[in-house]
Amino acid sequence: MKTHFLSLVLTVMLAVAPCFANRIYLIGDATPGGWSLDNAALMVPAADGVYEWVGDLNAGALKFVTHHDWLPSYGPATDNTALSIGTVDLALRSKNADPDNKFAVAAGRYALTIDMSGATPQLTVADGTGIEDKGLNAYYPEVIYAIGSATPAGWTVNNAIEMRESAFNSGIFEQVLTLNTGELKFLHQKDWGAGYGATLANDPVNGSGVYTIAALDDSDKKFAVTLTDATDYKVTVNAVTSSMTLSYYPEHLYIIGPAVGGWSWDDNAKEMTVSEEEGVFTWTGTLSEGEFKFFPEKDFGSVAYGATVAGQEIAATGEYNLEKLGAEDKKFIAPAANVTLTVDIKQMKLVSVQNTAEGISMVAEDGIIRIYDMMGMLRITLPANENVTDNLTKGIYIMVKGTETEKIIIR
């Protein structure tokens, strides 16, 4: 008897969004900036994958680059092809061994359009006479790099941390950086050339706030960051206003997971209340039995905070360590209970307190202050005129006075 085997081939069609260069530059001795990468003329985005430039060109050579580097670049399929009215395919040069083809340009006024949206990149050339200039000969970089002993990169230039522009030529660059005590500055490229630093040598940075930046010069003025512990900050460098803003990160915190209804940002995520204490967030509500974790943004690609052990079960009242999650997705398991959750990012602590009629929400006698710990245990009873903080050790407490409650954090 013959045995027949049937082979099935399953083809999966995936729709992938096209990815285009953020910028296209003209470079060459035919352009206003010559062969200087720092002075390359920037084309203006007209649509996804479409870039335009109008202006005067000199007699000489021309090609196109996508950032301040020689690779990748685009030129004609044949070297020394005349730049003439019409449309021509562009050839990609992705490595040094590829031909470095350039256009031969006659002096004149041109309107150039590059279209990357098709199967083959194309350059359309038109007469630019009577058309206003379009493009930028002076512009902000599309990316800068944070570097220095205050950053995880240290002074290794290849490890400098990328900070991308918030919008085309905005001059505003943002990134979440883990900062520690040390020096800090910003580079335009991963080399020791242009960038931004402080206006004074060792200008002090000691936490959240707005600081003044200046273009780096030979004096190489850096910021001197002084922090007690390594801390996450959202760092915004604004080249337009010559400022650097540090905001403690996260600025927001969301609870998500089956414990609060599911994994939908729109339907289930619960935003925690920002405390006056930097890095402290609270939320009061009813949890269902199930998993949960925390995110600083409504984005599963952002940093997540969870348990130190996968499947960490929490009690309705208790204190637990938090961890910034990496590849291992360690979630908390909640009980079914009405609770107040307090997250302290600086201390990396999660505190849960069950809300009951006879618990911390009780009414104290007039003129008496009662202090409870996060386990709901009464720690101290004091007269109303006595200094509360003098009687407490480091920790998080709930103060009850009459019908009022207040969270106290002793550091």
Image (cartoon, rainbow, N blue to C red):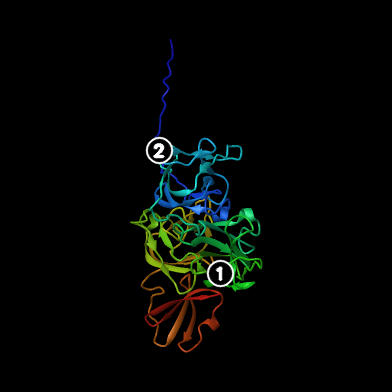
- Residue 71 in the image, given as x and y percentages of width and height: 57, 45
Res. 310 in view: no
Q: Identify the residue at image location x=50%, y=61%.
A: 173
**Relative to 235, is 155 on the left or the right?**
right
Please name whichever residue, 284 or 121, is drawn nearer the observer in this view of the structure. Answer: 121
Decide which of tag 2 and tag 1 comes sooner along the chain.
2
Q: Which residue is mark 2?
A: 14
Mark pair 2, 1: CA separation: 45 Å
Q: Tell me the amino acid under the disc marked 1.
A: Ile
In the rendered image, which quarter contains the N terminus? top left
> Local crowd at mark 1 within 10 Å, few (<14), some, or many (≥20)?
many
Q: Is residue 212 above or below residue 55?
A: below
Q: Tell me the amino acid under the disc marked 2.
A: Leu
Q: Quadrant of residue 354?
A: bottom left
Mark 1 lies on a secondary structure that is strand
- Residue 286 in the image, given as x and y percentages of width and height: 36, 63
Q: Is residue 50 above or below residue 203?
A: above
Q: Identify the residue at image location x=52%, y=81%.
A: 389
Res. 274 in view: yes
> Local crowd at mark 2 within 10 Å, few (<14), some, or many (≥20)?
few
Please name whichever residue, 29 or 372, is drawn nearer the observer in this view of the structure. Answer: 29
Q: Is residue 255 above or below residue 116?
A: below
Mark 2 lies on a secondary structure that is loop
- Residue 402 in the image, given as x and y percentages of width and height: 38, 83
Disc number for residue 213: 1
Q: Quadrant of residue 255?
A: bottom left
Q: Nearer the viewer, mark 2 or mark 1?
A: 1
In the rendered image, which quarter contains the C terminus? bottom right
Q: Are marks 2 and 1 in contact (CB under 8 Å)?
A: no
Q: Identify the residue at image location x=55%, y=83%.
A: 390
